[in-house]
Amino acid sequence: MQGPQISIVAPLYNETESFRHLVTRLNAVMDASSLAIEIVLIDDGSVDDTATLMQQLALSDARYQCIFLSRNYGHQIALTAGMAVAVGTEAIFIIDGDLQDPPELLSDFYKKYCEGYDVVYAVRKKRKESWIKRTAYSTFYRFMRSISYVDIPLDSGDFSLVSRRVVDIINQMPEESRFVRGMRSWIGFKQIGIEYERDARLAGESKYSFKMLRKLAYNGIFNFSEYPIKVVTKLGIVAIGISILYFVQTLVKKLFFSSVPQGFTAILFVIILFGGVQLIALGMIGEYVLRIFFQTKGRPLYIIKEIIREKQRQDSPK
Ligand code: UDP
Ligand code: MG
């Protein structure tokens, strides 16, 4: 058999509840398609039965390649591992393992790929999630777009079809704090969005805690924008401007009206305000330094405990 044309990549972290449905739907997609498809599932250090289910599946169905990471590394890294292992010669279709991104859309995405687009990304028309989450996401994407030096499309996540040449470039990008949708935009080529309705999670809870979401947002901001640094400089300039004005005003008052400045409260206010501003500024610089720190360690992004794939099974003695 020739190698697969398309790899469908899905990271999984404690997804036992939806696993069976995921496999059923992926099988249906493969059966209905005339393309040669492989599925790459990544176990991101699950602590439930996900890994066992994946092992059984990979051993019984040659279309599935399963990767097991040595611990939980987070969604973006798990995805990175999957992209590195996937061998699809034409493109890679990235979905979430919780069925929020319908795999059935592959044919629509592939059509666009055939029209010459290197990246076909999904744009969420409607999110079936709580309004707090929806507002937070929407605000973040708009803020990110306004400050980023890369043109990151609004309301698009990692759900996308990415051509082989773009995947090869992403695989060569060694950045440690990864924001795949930003890296994808940075690469360029012809990119296009397709609107879809993001389904609610089929089962279980979101595996992204508030802390992880904040980390992802920070990675987006500090990896794709120099705005925080620039804004600190601007704040400094504004502060100096205000202090000069205040100084002139005090001088005028003293010289012409011989009134004593009402110092104490104002001084206290200014000290506290700019103490805070300086701490924020330090923190922002710290975010960049932190990224340099982790990057210079040059550690591997992830460690693969085991891969079960067709080739290995063919190689192993009968
Ligand atoms: N995921 C992962 N590692 C993690 C957290 C999540 O591989 O540390 C997977 C998860 O199993 C799911 C996908 O990444 O398939 C998206 O995660 P989730 O559904 O929790 O995020 P949300 O859709 O709520 O943004
Ligand atoms: Mg989800």
Image: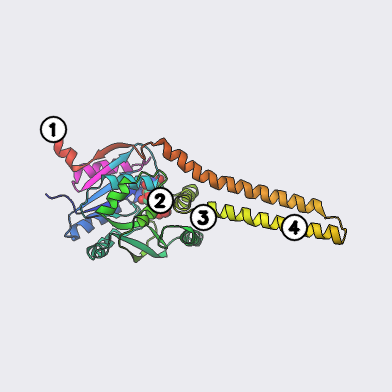
Q: Which label lies toward us, 4 or 3?
A: 4
Residue 171 x/y as whole percent: 30, 46
Q: Earlier in the sequence, mark 4 or mark 3?
A: 3
Task: Point out the tag, 2 or 3, that comes first from the N-terminus.
Answer: 2
Q: Nearer the viewer, residue 40 or 318?
A: 40
Dot 3: element: helix
Q: Position of residue 194 (x, y in %)?
A: 33, 66
Residue 152: in magenta span: no
Q: Is residue 306 left or right of residue 262?
A: left
Residue 227 got which mark? 3
Residue 317 - label: 1
Query: Which residue type carries mark 1?
Result: Pro
- Of tags 4 and 2, which is closer to the observer? 4
Question: Circles 2 and 3: CB distance less than 8 Å?
Answer: no
Circle 4 SS class: helix
Q: Nearer the viewer, residue 187 or 82?
A: 187
Question: In this figure, which residue is indicated by the disc labeled 4?
Answer: 246
Q: Amino acid at mark 2?
A: Phe
Q: Is residue 13 visible?
A: no
Q: Name the N-terminal-most of marks 4 and 1.
A: 4
